[in-house]
Amino acid sequence: GDSVTQTEGQVTVSESKSLIINCTYSATSIAYPNLFWYVRYPGEGLQLLLKVITAGQKGSSRGFEATYNKETTSFHLQKASVQESDSAVYYCALNSNYQLIWGSGTKLIIKP
Amino acid sequence: DMKVTQMPRYLIKRMGENVLLECGQDMSHETMYWYRQDPGLGLQLIYISYDVDSNSEGDIPKGYRVSRKKREHFSLILDSAKTNQTSVYFCASSWTGGVQNTLYFGAGTRLSVL
């Protein structure tokens, strides 16, 4: 079946440094899935950060970027300079038939 | 204000007790979802509701049932809770048209079954 694998557990980054959270996918039921990043800030529900529906395209929001790479089946999340307010759990997902398939989430911790 | 509200936020129950998790949304979304998330796993879909009294099983419906009598309200019921149902439960809603539409989530209910 379809699956999403992302950087496991947590990532600690110093404030103002760059970030990359890896996401790779396997999509057998759909040739060109839509790809998503959701974010969950402390005490809040998940919210859409960005999505890309076309292979080769890049999505961006709040300083974060992710490029849909069909050749490497990847959708890594990057930010050039993180801030304390970016502390959250980040989830990669793809659409498969009638539902979303989710990665396990990556907790981002920002070091002052 | 676009909001999905889950109640309660934290719940401790004993094995065999009944559990009711409530979810409300103020966006008149047709579609609503219940997910659970366990450590190291992605969100797993329990049930999806396409509108009032139009519910479908997700990937892990066993041990759960749902009720949707009003568009804005979707309940998850555990009859005789089991310890392996200890988890974080998320409710979400979206416009009809498939999951390419944005899902709006509640803050989650952390359920412990002892």
Image: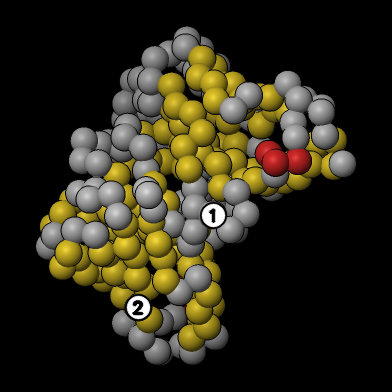
Image quadrant where one finds the N terminus of chain A: top left
Residue A104 coordinates in the image, percent (x, y): 56, 47
What is the CA distance from the residue labelled 1 to the residue labelled 2? 21 Å
Is residue A95 left or right of B57 when viewed as pictured?
Answer: right
Task: For mark 2, give the secondary structure.
Answer: strand
Classify mark 1: helix, strand or loop.
loop
Which residue carries the number 1 mark? A44
Q: Is residue A37 above or below residue B38?
A: above
Q: Amino acid at mark 2?
A: Leu
**Other-residue count near label 2 (Cα within 10 Å), few / some / many at <14 / 14–19 / ≥20:** some
Residue under circle 2?
B20
Q: Residue at x 25, y 68 (%)?
A: B66
Residue B103 rendering spot, x and y as whole percentages: 37, 43
Q: How many marks?
A: 2
Q: Is residue A90 visible?
A: yes
Residue B7 drawn at (x, y percent) = 42, 71
Where A106 sits versus A34, above or below? Answer: below
Residue B28 lies, in percent from the top left, at: 22, 50
Kind of residue at badge 1 = Glu
Give neighbour class at mark 1: few <14, some 14-19, many 20+ (Cα, 10 Å).
few
Q: Nearer the viewer, residue B70 or B79?
A: B70
Residue at 38%, 20% (x, y): give it.
Answer: A53
